[in-house]
Amino acid sequence: MTDDTTRDAAAPEAPRDFIREIVAGDLATGRAKQVVTRFPPEPNGYLHIGHAKSICLNFGIAEEFGGRCNLRFDDTNPAKEEQEFIDAIERDVTWLGFKWSGEVKFASDYFDRLYGWAVELIEKGLAYVDDQTPDEMRAARGTLTEPGKNSPFRDRTVEENLKLFGAMKDGQFAAGKCVLRAKIDMASGNINLRDPVLYRIVDASHPRTGTAWKIYPSYDFAHGQSDAIEGITHSICTLEFEDHRPLYDWFIANLSVPSKPHQYEMARLNLTHTLLSKRVLTGLVKGNHVSGWDDPRMPTIAGLRRRGVPPQAIRDFVKRIGVAKANSQVDLGALDYSVREALNKSAWRRMAVLKPIKVVIENYPDGEGEELEAVNHPDDAAAGSRKIKFTRELFIERDDFMEVPEKKFFRMAPGREVRLRYAYFVTCKEVVKNAAGEFVELRCTYDPASKGGNSPDGRKVKATIHWVSAAHAIPAEVRIYNLLFNDPNPSADPEIFASQINPQSREVLTDARLEPSLAEAKVEVPVQFERQGYFCLDRDSAPGRLVFNRTIGLRDTYAKDVAKG
Ligand code: ATP
Ligand code: MG
């Protein structure tokens, strides 16, 4: 990195994507004294991982360059917006670790001023009330190759427009009767400039303004002017708004706004196996394909949190993928990588048997037991250790036993010696089956000289397996999550995506047995079940009925399975 003067303003480790370059340049030339950004969600659903990219960028830039970032709800469409979503969005932004500047802001805070600016446009002869039906308007809009046609109502006088717009505001017309449009150019090569709609009549109660307003501003009319009111210097949005920028600039140029913000566009986040659109996510929730917005299979921030993904994993992921000007698709494995990185560092280790089979240690005295020392984190001595009970009857993982072991299966099998983690070497002597031929228990012996799992005489075992004491273990339900869509590019078509849902996206194991210390697990706090993956307690837990979610497996078995074909 060269030694330019803007370096001082930015955190040294801040990656220099093109937006940060622009911000640094604007601070250097004085176009902006202080950078002011905003995150502008519409409260019509929960935030998803794509929004996290925008959040990390907007709040991150403000932090790195000593500026501020507003949280502003784009609440201009009362038909779809709800207080529940406002609350969830505030919670999610906070959970990700960001703090907005001052009070939460709402586009609805500016409805009076926006109305005033609409009147200003009418007075300047730059806006008119159009009585065409939606169909007529659509037909007159033209196409990418053909110009549109002027509305027969385009040349109404200023007085008439003022009177009609006032009547719209006063609720004298039914929804859909007429709209206010900017008078720009029906032949513009940019369709967004073909007399865009500024105000619609909407008959719905607004979460904040109730029924005070009968008309609501369009996104385009509200957004830039809200930016101007708040003194936003860099209004960052996704690429689909690039064609709206001339309109954004037209409003700023033609209205007496208090500041002159600029819009910048970046690529939106697209992820394999994932649909990031609130319309689709709403469909998954409303169609009961998932248990709710925070179902751990959802790509929502709330779903990821419930699943056990820590906020630093999301921030790390966003940092790694960077910010570009061209759309692309990120492999879901990149998110998994960041999740494992974060969890490996933070999660304490525990033993849990997900699908148990009983083991009886025949030469261990009945009714006796002992406590063994187990470390909480192999790379963090400060995490300390805990005691685990060893007794005559244990549970091991059903999958850690094969009666007729395959080649390369080194775990428990008849006649074979393996190590029980932290405990002893044990040898399987006999397999007990019921009348149906199912395994009931494994009868084993242990070598008392191998205490702590150390070889007494240089004897080698090829596997170490986890276990819990049968009498001490606590029962639990464990929910295993797999891809919601096996197809890397699921369809966003509402007729199709529901049929593409992976029927095995959630497996519920009802007979798991956990080491007793897991009774103290806390909701959403990650823990590693040794050899199994990362898990966290779910909020569905009740006293005596623990429920754990698998956040992610230890290794990327998905990539391996794909490679195997
Ligand atoms: P969706 O398309 O999922 O319904 P949206 O863009 O309508 O999302 P908003 O609430 O309007 O949702 O988005 C708030 C901010 O988050 C906007 O600035 C938007 O550009 C940004 N954003 C939304 N989706 C993504 C994404 N996938 N990647 C990056 N930024 C996104
Ligand atoms: Mg939007």
Image (cartoon, grey):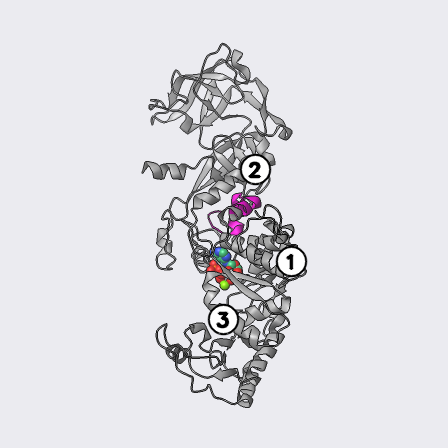
Q: Total number of numbered labels?
A: 3
Q: Position of residue 474 (x, y in %)?
A: 54, 32
Q: Secondary structure at mark 3?
A: helix
Which segment is the magenta one?
A: 296-317
Q: CA distance from mark 1 to mark 3?
A: 26 Å
Q: Amino acid at mark 2?
A: Gly
Q: Residue furthest right?
A: 102
Q: CA distance from mark 2 to mark 1?
A: 47 Å
Tell me if 268 is positioned left or right of 89 in this view.
left
Q: Earlier in the sequence, mark 1 or mark 3?
A: 1
Q: Amino acid at mark 1?
A: Arg
| Residue 227, quarter of the rendered image | bottom right
Q: Quadrant of the C terminus?
A: top left
Q: Which mark is residue 544?
A: 2
Tell me if 177 is positioned left or right of 110 in this view.
left
Provide the residue designation for mark 3: 246
Residue 331 shows up from this direction: yes
Q: Which mark is residue 68?
A: 1
Q: Which mark is residue 46?
A: none
Q: Residue at x 58, y 71 (%)?
A: 225
Q: Amino acid at mark 3?
A: Pro
Residue 545 shows up from this direction: no
Q: Secondary structure at mark 2?
A: loop
| Residue 55, quarter of the rendered image | bottom right
Q: Position of residue 440 (x, y in %)?
A: 41, 25
